Amino acid sequence: MFKEKNKIIVLVFLIHLSICFGYHVRSSYRNIVVDFSGLYDRVPLNITIYKDPYFKIPYLTFNFTWSKFSDPEFSNYTFDRISYVATMDSKKYYGSAADACIHDGKTKKTECGYQSFSVNRCLFHSYNVTFLNKPPTKGGVINVTGEFMRFGTGDLKVALFKSGEFYHNVTVAGEYDDPNYNPNFLSITFPRGYGKFEFCLDIDETQCYDWSFQSPSISSVYYNTTNQHLTIKGDNFYNTTEGHIMPTVIFVYINGSPLKESDISPNGYEEMVLNYSSIYTQELNISIFIDTLYTNNTIQIPPYPASYSTNATKYNEGIVEITGTQLLSQKEQNDLKITIFGKLCNFIPPSNLTYIKCRLPKGVDNNQNTIQVCVNNICSINNLIYEYAKPIISSVTQNGFIFTIQGKYHGSYNDNSTQVIVTYDSNIKQIILPLSIQTDETESVFKIPFFCGSAVVQLVVNGLKSNEYTINANSNVEIISPPSTDSKTPLIVLLSYYDCKYYKSNTFNPIFKIQNSKTIGTKVNNTYSFNVIPGTGTKQATITFANKNVTIEYSYAKPNVLKHNVEYNDPINTVILYGANFGTNSSLCNITYNGIEKECQVIDHYQIKFKVESIEISSNISITIDGIISDSYIMELVKCKLINEQLYPTSFGCLESEPVVNYYCDDLKTYSSKTDPNKLLSATFNNEATMIDFQGNNISVHIKEGISSSTLKLFLIGIFSKSNQINRKESIVYNSKIQYDEQQSLINLDITGFNFGEPYDIGLPTVYNTTFANKNCSMLYHGTKYNKNCTIDIITCQLTLPHIFNKDLILEDKESSNTTLTIPFTLKLGNNIIYSSFNNIEHIPAKDNKKKTKTIALATTLSIGLTLLFAGSVYGVWRHHQNKIENTKKEKN
């Protein structure tokens, strides 16, 4: 009996201990259930929740249900049970502090305003707590979701994280009196830290969760052989190697070997510098520990090209020499690859750790203008920006206005990539293209018409600039334009390379002397004009400028024939030529008439006459006046003028007679009476001979059918005389039809209109995924035995559809729809394009032989030459229809 009593006493004692000050929490999601030992404990009757930690903003009151509960776990000991069920959204339940009205089991009295650890245990517990992210080691904001997370906190704005290294309150975002406060989504600001920790939501540290800072990561590595520093960039490092409590928190292992703490230099939270000796390109396994969190990566110490020199250009191969570090690996065999512009530069042995070279082929050029070195597939990341060898000027020679520049790397004349910049008079610049460039790029030739004083020249080849080179040129004079024989047009010369001061003041204008005549030049830009005496041929004169006399040789302008007149006499005919620069009656005149030299007589500056026995209908004339030869002049005795300039149809089937082009030709009747007119006058249409009808001075030239503009040419005795453009009438689409034969998987097209022709092409929207050539189509011209209608041309086509064809692209909407389907097409006729759309659509179903026809859009036809903009808008209307069909199907599904 004594033993049994002892057991009961021990049991009661155990119950007391296990329920922690006389209560036992059995709460669950949205339910508060707590059992109390009513003999000893203070049992809450209700609890008031305050938003703030100062008990000034009451928010919620929990009125508990009080009952008795016999607990079989404790030998049916009867507890006082309180319970409460949440009736609102969990977002409504939160608070900083709480007090209670309690019933004291010992004194049997009720007391309000009671605050205790046990009161916090009678609140809802956090549920479904989820951390959305981890804090970075430099500190930052994390977000946490869950329910009932802000009870028993002591302060809504405070939470706690703790570990062997840290014990810190953290700030939770929000305000006590915010009506939109959301306790189910918390934004919490963490200070800097590292490693794993416990995160506690309540002040009593009963609702805690295991979490950690973010693990370290590596983004890039750079190795400096000069100081043997391995710089690692990444994230979530720590800014010191020493911990708050632990002596060391950063540990680094390379290929399994630890680095000394003195060889680790953190630089903030995103960079770490390690002392590590390496002269080779190699791969390393590196592990970085920040407390208990780590990252393990394979990193590379790549080759490091630091500089280069080259004599290669885009137009000639050359050598590229590269210096740097880690240009070899420790392996016996090194696979070296050097790429420039993304193309292989052929490696030239030998090489060493700091030097390699390669041969770069010519013609390699794109936007990837970098040098990359790869050793055993480990490639440099500090890729050098590569430029071809810059042009070099070593000397410049002058020959009048022509300057030859010697040096290297001058580019290619054919590539049009070279120019010279000429700078003179402090800041005046000219950009000049070359006359020629040597293929080995050692010499380039330029014509530099003008500069004053000394000039600085600089070559630019594909944007690369050479050294600057100063030239002091010899003065030079160039004839820009000759004077007229009647002196009404002056002599214009260019005086180049004198001291700049002589060009800046009219007091230094040049003086022109010839025989006893003297005139002062008038400046026009950088040229000077002189009013010379009338004359012909070639003369010598002296120009005095900048205290220098220069002897020049100039010629008068060459004779120029503008028109002619023939005086017919038997047996000698007289031809008078009218024009300019013929000289005076004392000028020596010779003429070549159809290859035969004849004497001629100068009447004055504007007229010449000569005699000839036989007059040709078309003659080639050249004049020489005092040694100055004119351009050739074609003297046509028959001149034809177009009478009926008009537009012509593309097809002549409905015309009573084929159209012709009519000309009136002066004196044709006179000359054609003496010979066959077809030998005098001939014609071509699009470079093919065509027939001419003659009637006095009128001719009619026959032309042909066609869709495009054509060229008509006339010839006098086989010599080209003149040409005219023959234009066609506008092509028009009247009507169009598209028929979808679902049985045969065909599309049939009919396009009717006028002034069609060949060649032609028809374009459909690309969504039909089908193409066809002219062989799929045929054309019926108007006015033929197959097409008697004189107002219609017809094109018919048949297209075979692909196996997979979306018939909704062509079928009309349902009857109830008010959407109009238009299917655009283009009709290209020669060089002209018509933009239109099919105005009716026929559908032959797969299983029903009855043809269904519904016209769903009016034809839209645009004139030739209108832009593609309208075609795009037509296609847009059609595409809108297709979208509506697809959306209707989605709604049904």
Image (cartoon, grey):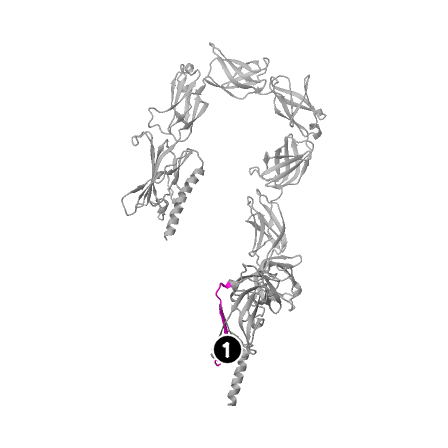
Total numbered labels: 1
In this view, the residue in front, 339 or 246, is 246
Residue type, label 1: Phe
Picture coordinates of residue 764 (x, y %)?
Answer: 39, 41
Q: Would residue 96 appear left or right of 843 to someone viewing this image? A: right
In this view, the residue in front, 840 or 20, is 20
Residue sitting at x 54%, y 72%: 44
In this view, the residue in front, 842 or 471, is 842
Picture coordinates of residue 134 (x, y %)?
Answer: 56, 62
Can residue 762 be seen in the rendering of this structure?
Answer: yes
Residue sitting at x 52%, y 87%: 5
Q: From this view, report whether residue 681 is shown above or below residue 879.
A: above
Q: Which residue is mark 1?
A: 79
Q: From this view, report whether residue 672 is shown above or below residue 3.
A: above
Judged from this view, the residue extending furthest toward the left is 849
Judged from this view, the residue extending furthest toward the front is 109
Say whether residue 88 is magenta. yes
Categorize mark 1 by other alpha carbons within 10 Å: few (<14), some (14-19), many (20+).
many
Q: From this view, report whether residue 276 is shown above or below residue 616.
A: below
The magenta-colored residue range is 74-90
Secondary structure, mark 1, is: strand
Picture coordinates of residue 786 (x, y %)?
Answer: 29, 32
Judged from this view, the residue extending furthest toward the top is 570
Q: Would residue 824 appear left or right of 451 to someone viewing this image? A: left
Q: From this view, report whether residue 181 is shown above or below residue 116.
A: above
Picture coordinates of residue 169 (x, y %)?
Answer: 61, 65
Judged from this view, the residue extending furthest toward the right is 547
Res 703 → quadrant: top left
Res 402 → quadrant: top right
Can residue 499 be seen in the rendering of this structure?
Answer: no
Res 796 → quadrant: top left
